[in-house]
Amino acid sequence: MRTKRPISEAELETLQRETFNYFIHEANPANGLIMDKTETNWPASIAATGLALAAYPVGVERGFWERSIAVERTLTTLRFFWNSPQGPEPDATGYQGFYYHFLDMQTGRRVWDCELSTIDSTFLLAGALTAGAYFDAETAEEREIRALADALYRRCNWAWAQNGKATVTHGWRPESGFISYRWDGYDEALLLYVLGLASPTHSLSQDSYDAWLSTYRWEQCYGYDYLYAGSLFTHQLSHVWIDFRGIQDAFMRSKGIDYFENSRRATYVQQRYAIENPRKFVGYGEYCWGITASDGPGLATLKLQGIERTFFDYLGRGVPYGPDDGTLAPWAAVASLPFAPDIVLPAIDFYIHQVKLKESNVYGFKASFNPTHPGEPGNPFGWWVSPWHFGLNQGPIVLMIENFRSGMVWRLMRDCSYIQKGLRRAGFTGGWLAEDGKAGG
């Protein structure tokens, strides 16, 4: 096994650029929609589209594509969502300012009878606000980007999504109404509550955030005290946009840390779990970890080396309690780069040079792999590797590498009045919020 060493800056930029290419090529340039994954005839994901909107400024700054091209793509995307059908009809694009999870790549209409997704709409709107913050030139096109991003955010009816209670529902379907599940328990909805509280038009009620905090679960795992969430992505996605270093809400003040430190601890728990490897999966170790929501080898039970193993398809895998079937997602390790570079950089190096998950691969790392599962006969790795790329994986790689390298996305969003206002309404104080001194808009 390769000894621990840092990945070079050039290799990190190459990974970022190759991953960014997903958003250039897996898109419909006529409406800006981004494919959920690279399977033939697959629909668009609004979350992936939001991540793309946030990644375009990174692409401009890093020279991955020209500003004029990024402006055109961004404007096309925002115009599509502003003008797309909004209403209770089952084939609309959205309703109440939210959007359906999956949309037809060509028509932009709802597919698969999917839900109107509050969290995926949050990522879409966060991407729009990132674009509005970055494209600040006094040209007609960039003024329109800012105006559309603001209008899309203001149209979203967060209060409606509470459905008469404090916490926010996962979503709504025209056939059956609101989904019974709500955003409670620590998860990626941190960003949702911040944006929902800040709305100048249809904001969440003041008690919504405290109701969410009341469902938190504080644990100790492998010697780390932290706010528990099993899948690693839940400790990352809100951090794509918000710099939580040094700012605290009531819960974090009571624990003496911030959400950034909490994500650092969650990252170390992941590595410790892989080192301990309680279920004895192949490959887990100091440099080989990253257990999260990911593609998997498919639902099957196999007897391997005398042990009966059950494997799953796409699933929200997590640690230390599972579910865990030996599937690892390199993107999840990369997205923790700002929190724990001392263990993430060697892991990236290991995935490039030892596991070779970038070889003959146009979009950076393979989405996920499982060294315990034998995979299809004759495959070049000798174990299962996902055949697809997913937009929801690609975005955090591009954006969190950039936050590690320059803090660019965090800096843009620290200046966003809605982020400031939402954090303050949620009770955050200290750090850059105190230094900023702005009231928020």
Image (cartoon, helix red, strand yellow):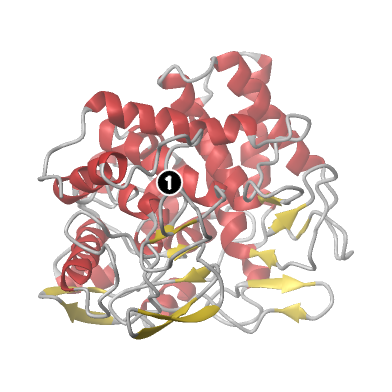
Viewer-side residue, 327 vs 169: 327
Q: Say if 142 sits above or below 92 in the image.
A: above
Residue 315 at x, y = what percent? 51, 71
The crowd level at tag 1 (other Cα within 10 Å; few <14, some 14-19, many 20+) is many
Q: Is residue 311 left or right of residue 306?
A: right
Q: Is residue 195 left or right of residue 254?
A: right
Residue 233 at x, y = what percent? 40, 60
Residue lying at 24% horizontally and 60% vertically, measured from the top left? 267
Viewer-side residue, 148 vs 61: 61
Residue lying at 53% horizontally and 60% vertically, measured from the top left? 376
Residue 123 at x, y = what percent? 55, 52
Q: Say if 228 sits above or below 381 in the image.
A: below
The residue that disc 1 covers is 396
Residue lying at 48% horizontally and 74% vertically, measured from the top left? 208
Q: Say if 297 sits above or below 146 in the image.
A: below
Residue lying at 31% horizontally and 47% vertically, measured from the top left? 355
Q: Is residue 217 left or right of residue 323?
A: left
Three-letter code, disc 1: Pro
Q: Say if 123 sits above or below 178 in the image.
A: above
Q: Is residue 246 left or right of residue 160?
A: left
Residue that lies at the very extreme toward the front in this rendered image: 378
The reply to whether residue 134 is in sight is yes
Residue 41 at x, y = what percent? 77, 48
Label total for image: 1
Image quarter for residue 25?
A: top right
Image quarter for residue 406?
A: top left
Viewer-side residue, 278 vs 35: 278
Element at badge 1?
Answer: helix
